[in-house]
Image (cartoon, helix red, strand yellow):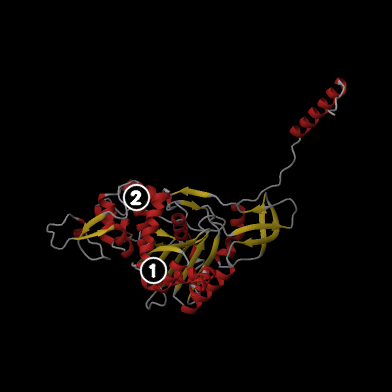
Amino acid sequence: MRKIYPPKLLVLMLSALGLLAFFFWVNPRPTKPKLSKREIAQSLTGAITQNRFPSEGQVVFNQTAMTGQFNYTLNAELQSYMEKLLGQYKPDYGAFVAVDPKTGAILSLLSYTREKKDTGNLALKASFPAASIFKIVTAAAAFDKNKANPETVVSFTGANHTLYRQNLKPPRSTRWVRRMRLREAFARSVNTVFGKLGIYTVPKEDLNHYAEKFQFNQVIPADLPVESGTFEFAGEDPLSVAEIASGFNRNVLMSPLQGAMIGGAIANNGAMMEPFLVQSFKPENPGFVYQAEPRIIANVVSPETARELRTMMQDTVRVGTSRKSFRGLVKKSVSAEIEMGGKTGSLTGNHPKGKYDWFVGYAKQGDRAIAMAALTINEENWRVKSSYLARSAVEQYFEPEIKLAKIKRKKK
């Protein structure tokens, strides 16, 4: 039976509730202070720069130092495996970064020097020419603006990996003219094709806009001290534009971490995530808390453009410049239903001096995915290709899926 309160009692109850609500409005319940990436980055800068990941440290918040435990996002098996691989092949310099494309969590962060020189953390430095990795940005601008697609045919003259002013002009004769689809030019890294794409198809304004989308000339929001990649045109003439669009220049610089972010954005349907290394920080002081939260930096390209870029990146590992390194893994990945792709780049540089060799790419199967950037620098002799380091990382990360596929094949 429904209970009925006397009118006076009901008025008293409502008045009490009103007073209680007013009290909490005037004196709100204190919220737990939340640490930010900025405080985490400031506390770890010295250690991470020296390639160390301390399990315990101090974080300063509101001028108060708090000691606590750091919980990192690193995949222990992948980190250990890639560290051993770099130690085995001993390039003069090397760096490897892997991220989860969906969250931005850093799965591996490695810096290597053969002579144990004090170079800091090479994975976070942006003194390396992006080389042909920038072809990803040029293609993204062309596809996203509906000015080209992977099947677009470009006519050109000259060799694949050179870039001369005379090859950028309309040919006087058709005798030596070659015609190539963009997907093939991307996979084989043909400079003249992408140089002409920059001159005749993608305006300088679009190249600049998409470079900034991919975080060139931007402060990368992260909980570790990563340097900003830089992008600039050396001049106004067509050759300068062609050099930028094809990656045949030393004016576009990036870090391996930014390279992994670029691969991650393509794998994540165009959404680039903020990178983070610390999953959580648990201080001894009660009431303080830090828990990483995935955040999107920007939707750099549309999902359709990202899909088109992935099809070209898949060609790179199947029939393009990294086919030799990925040859054995391609067959395994097909049976395990692992999609993978990438882009290579090579150029000489001066910081440090040597021949730079890049691989930026991704691999994914179902809900599991990894994006990576591998960089090796060799002063004289080649010791290991970046493509091989990337292939090894994919094979290690997806080892359970590859083994399961092998078992299923044997049962058939």
Q: Amino acid at mark 2?
A: Phe
Disc ID at residue 356: 1
**Label 2 residue SS:** helix
Q: Which residue is mark 2?
A: 143
Q: Could you tell me residue 324's position as x and y percent?
A: 37, 73
Residue with the most extreme front position: 412
The quadrant holding residue 186 is: bottom left
Q: CA distance from mark 2 to mark 1?
A: 28 Å
Front-most of 97 and 410? 410
Q: Is residue 386 visible?
A: no
| Above or below: residue 54 compared with residue 170 | below
The amino acid on which the numbered mark 1 sits, given as a three-letter code, is: Tyr
Q: Earlier in the sequence, mark 2 or mark 1?
A: 2
**Number of numbered callouts drawn:** 2
* Percent coordinates x, y for residue 99 in the rendering: 52, 61
Q: Position of residue 338 (x, y in %)?
A: 46, 64
Identify which residue is drawn at 66% across, 65% down. Answer: 55
Rendering quarter of residue 309: bottom left
Q: Is residue 76 visible?
A: yes
Helix, strand, or loop for circle 1? strand
Q: Nearer the viewer, mark 2 or mark 1?
A: 2
Dot 1 alpha-carbon crowd within 10 angstroms: few under 14, some 14 to 19, many 20 or more: many
